[in-house]
Amino acid sequence: MSELLSLSDLHVRFHTAAGVVRAVNGVSLDLAVGETLGLVGESGCGKSTLGKAIMRLVPVSQGEIRVDGADVTHLAGTALNQMRRKVQMIFQDPYGSLNPRQTVGRSVGQPLVVAGWKRDAIAARIDELLRLVRLPPDAKQRYPHEFSGGQRQRIGIARALALSPKLIICDEPVSALDVSVRAQVINLLEELKQQFGVSYLFISHDLSVVEHIADRVAVMYLGTIVEAGGRDQIWKRPQHPYTKALLEAAPIANPRLARARRRTVLQGELPSPLAPPAGCPFHSRCPIAQERCKSDRPALRPVGEGALAACHFV
Amino acid sequence: MTVLEVRELSTTLFTRRGTMTAVESMSLGVGVGETVALVGESGCGKSLTALSIMRLLPDPPARITAGAVVLNGRDLVALPEEAMLDIRGREIGMIFQDPMSSLNPVATVEKQIAEVLAAHTELDRTRARARVLELLEQVGMPDAERRLDAYPHQLSGGMCQRVMIAMAIACSPAMLIADEPTTALDVTVQAQVLTLLKRLQQDSGMAMIFITHDLAVVAEVADRVVVMYAGRKVEEAPVDDLFEAPKHPYTAGLIGATPVPGAARTERLADIPGMVPALNELPAGCAFAPRCPRVMARCRTDRPVLTEPRPGRLVACFAAEKDAA
């Protein structure tokens, strides 16, 4: 498979009154055509910032972003708009990401207007998009507040699909939804992938959802990727101690399995990204940390089965 | 032994758009050392049930219109507010979803916990401070002594939730109500808080009502589960039975819609079509009928009542009745 998205040594730094926040700290990652890559981690690990950086919604401090082989790291103006036809994004809060004073039709059609489509073609495309995400045709004359959370997320998906992008960055797209509606949206995303061959970067803190939808998974901690690998490898043979801890911490919707498993609960909380620990970012909470981890930052390296892990002891 | 018993409780919302029954004829019992999970999607009435038990309903619009809440032999619904002030915090503790906004932002950790002690005990200031420190250590607060003088904004979400738990258990209540206590927390911190709650319960034999929308959390903490839909209990069962053989199609739908890590990968999650109906637009008959895969003609006109096919298993569904017959 060819790479659709390729990140090398990407850094995003925010300069705040309290100091420099290294939100994304040297991330290298590839995503192939037709692939769903899950990006998991706890709040503040930089996963959303990474998604926004790829969309060029936050400034990149260092490193390179390639989409379809072309360097897009420093694009501006028309060239940046061209790139965004290939890469679209859907957000966690489907209400906050829609203009409350615009009809659904206008919101969904906005990308087409920007792309210079003719009015008739836009109207036809809006109807088609609403049908694809299974919203009633009259939805286009209505306003976001008339819809439920799940329907609003469908509107966001319709808008993202408008220009037939190759990649959709999904930032916690189902986290704000109820269980039954969450399953509807996940199923819709999977159908659209089969129908159009779109790839997803699926950002989520919910491991069970990621396991369901992703082909490959990258685990982020304090701005860095600590492990990346195939879905089965990550769940069955996790290598990095943080990946293991995350999987053990995730509740299992099966009471017998939940009781039977051995579980070491990770102590402490995510350190502040303002003052990340020296050496391995995880050493302050790591159950197998040694002296060396306090000073040497481990590089992401192959650990078999096509997996990568950043730990001195795997 | 039953600590708390809710009998046929109904809570009604009186609004400009009409009168709506948010909790209808709800019954619930919790025993010593037992955890009952109250599960359902947003708007199903699970939090209002908890607030009704605590008598913390926002009135207007919400008011208890029928039923009883019996705690240690007394009906809380009939008690005057002054008596409730004494019961809340001493006999029933409660923790909430959002620990940051549930704490007073301008009071130190010590002051907030000591307030509970001042209301219900005779401890003087020095002894209260010692007790607060002891509580913080009990809830696993890192660097407990240093946190006494901290303000909520200086603490993480997980630490704020520990402070809330310390306040809730300060007077060793027989009953703890936890309303989505880990929903706002990260998975590793969620695991810490769930482990903490279980440990506290084992140590004290406290009864617990655990409210959540997350079935995976239910599987981790509950002994018994009550599933709510549109203000009513639709199923109740011991936790293993519920997950292995759900009787109500809504319960089955919720379980099917929750992916289990490590399970064989299915192409589609079993979703439930449509969405939760608004309380003022409830259909005649069974409230779940418009979304139900097993709907029959009768479901659209008659409302199923709870039946008890086996002791401890309750279900309100005509299709389940047919299965049992």
Image (cartoon, coloured by chain):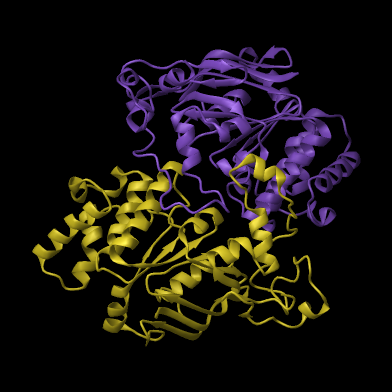
Residue B21 shows in the view: no
Q: Reply above or below: A9 against A85.
A: below
Q: Quadrant of residue A197?
A: bottom left
Depth check: B186 or B120 in front?
Answer: B186
Q: Quadrant of residue B301?
A: top left
Name the residue: 39% across, 28% down: B288
Display colour for chain A: yellow
The chain coloured purple is B
- Residue B104 location in percent, x, y? 66, 45
Name the residue: 45% across, 32% down: B250
Q: Is residue A119 left or right of residue A108?
A: left
Depth check: A34 or A311 in front?
Answer: A34
Q: Reply above or below: B273 against A175.
A: above
Name the residue: 59% across, 69% down: A220
Q: Quadrant of the N terminus of chain B?
A: top right
Q: Residue furthest left?
A: A120
Q: Is residue A11 left or right of residue B75?
A: left
Q: Is residue B159 left or right of residue B53?
A: right
Q: Is residue B75 left or right of residue A108?
A: right
Residue B50 shows in the view: yes
Depth check: B274 or B88 in front?
Answer: B274
- Residue B121 location in percent, x, y? 84, 29
